[in-house]
Amino acid sequence: MPVLERIRTFADAMQAWRHDLHAHPELLYDVERTAGVVAEKLRAFGCDEVVTGIGRTGVVGVIRGKGRTSNRAIGLRADMDALPIQEVRDLPYRSTVPGKMHACGHDGHTAMLLGAAKYLAETRDFDGAAVLIFQPAEEGGGGGDAMVEDGLMERFGIESVYGMHNIPGMKVGTFAIRPGPIMASTDRFTLTIEGRGGHAALPQNAVDSVLVASHVIIALQSIVARNLDPLQSAVVSVCALDAGEAFNVLPQTVTMRGTMRTLSQPVRAQIKARIETLVAEIAAGFGATGVTAFGASYPVTENHPAETEFMADVAAALVGGENVDRAVAPMMTAEDFSYMLGRRPGAYMFIGNGDSASLHHPHYDFNDAAAPYGASLWARLIETGLPLTA
């Protein structure tokens, strides 16, 4: 039986797993229940090895094929954490935790990899090891980095690694990928303007930090428009501003927070330097001081060419070449799968989620019809990449 048809025979089970995870969302590294469910199912499927606590709360399952000539291992990764968003749809399996929901489809990603685990543990039609990676803290916590730093690649002998994310608006049963950068780096910044507070009716006796901050915000938009090569891509966004509390007081300090996104390390360094320069020099021009601090960041998610072609070929064999976009435009959102691709060759692919609300939206829901396609792609990556020999 073809893999897609076989996996469809337990699509209802994958849906049930996904709905259970959706009803019990957990954030960042605090995914104890989710990780426990994953580990329990991997053991029930008959995985040869199930290890918990990798990267704090990550889970790894190892399935060895029936072939016994290869020591090769391929890693497949799914993320487990939810988002601090209040769900608004009245689904039968809606979140039971106020202020938390699976608004990015990580419940679906986990269910798809569990589906692949069930199939691979039953069939074992490959030679080598399938390493199933269930990662915490993708949503800003750097769980991918934590698992890598915990020895993930070395401990399980992973030679290449693959990831996947659902995309609303892409037809179910389709895939998209590209070599090179596919998702952006992300850097958080905090900008602090220190002026001289005073009475709003006597601005001549003060240094208006709000006015300075306004000039800084406008100037930051000139970086992409006037400092960056037009053929490059970047985003600089100021998303929060804290200043004052009274209608008649010029505040001493203004704090701004935002994000920058790029698709290459040289552009990333260029924009960081330009932000620091503009903040400091614009503030100085008004008699204030300006300080920039950069926070948690993810590198560019950059696909390796050979592994990208391999993943695209496997997808095309599964759903037909017309349903695989091999040159999708990169997205300016970010992914900590970038840390895994920084340690091992591999690729990251998009899978269609159909007509759904956008990611990180309170109306979003993963499309269960996509799960058999994702689970089948995972299974075929292993069977194709680690073929049985006669």
Image (cartoon, grey):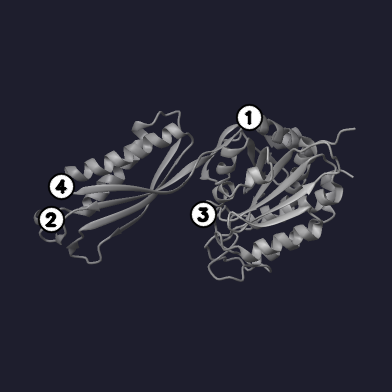
Residue 287: numbered disc: 4
Residue 141: numbered disc: 3
Which residue lies at the image location 21% right of the left edge and 60% below the top edge?
A: 251
The mark closer to the camera, 1 or 2, is 1
- Local SS, label 2: loop
Which residue has dot 2 on it?
206
Of label 4 and label 2, which has the lower sequence position?
Answer: 2
Residue type for callout 2: Ala
Which residue has dot 1 on it?
305
51, 283: nearer the viewer: 51
Answer few, some or many: residues within 10 Å of disc 2's Cα (few below 14, many 20 plus, some between 14 and 19). some
Query: Where 170 falls versus 48 (above or below)?
Result: above
Residue type for callout 4: Gly
Q: Are marks 3 and 1 in contact (CB under 8 Å)?
A: no
* Distance from Cα at disc 3 to Cα at disc 1: 28 Å
Residue 365 horizontal/vertical position (percent): 63, 58
Residue 129 horizontal/vertical position (percent): 76, 43
* Distance from Cα at disc 4 to Cα at disc 2: 10 Å
Of label 1 and label 4, which has the lower sequence position?
Answer: 4
312, 140: nearer the viewer: 140
- Local SS, label 4: loop
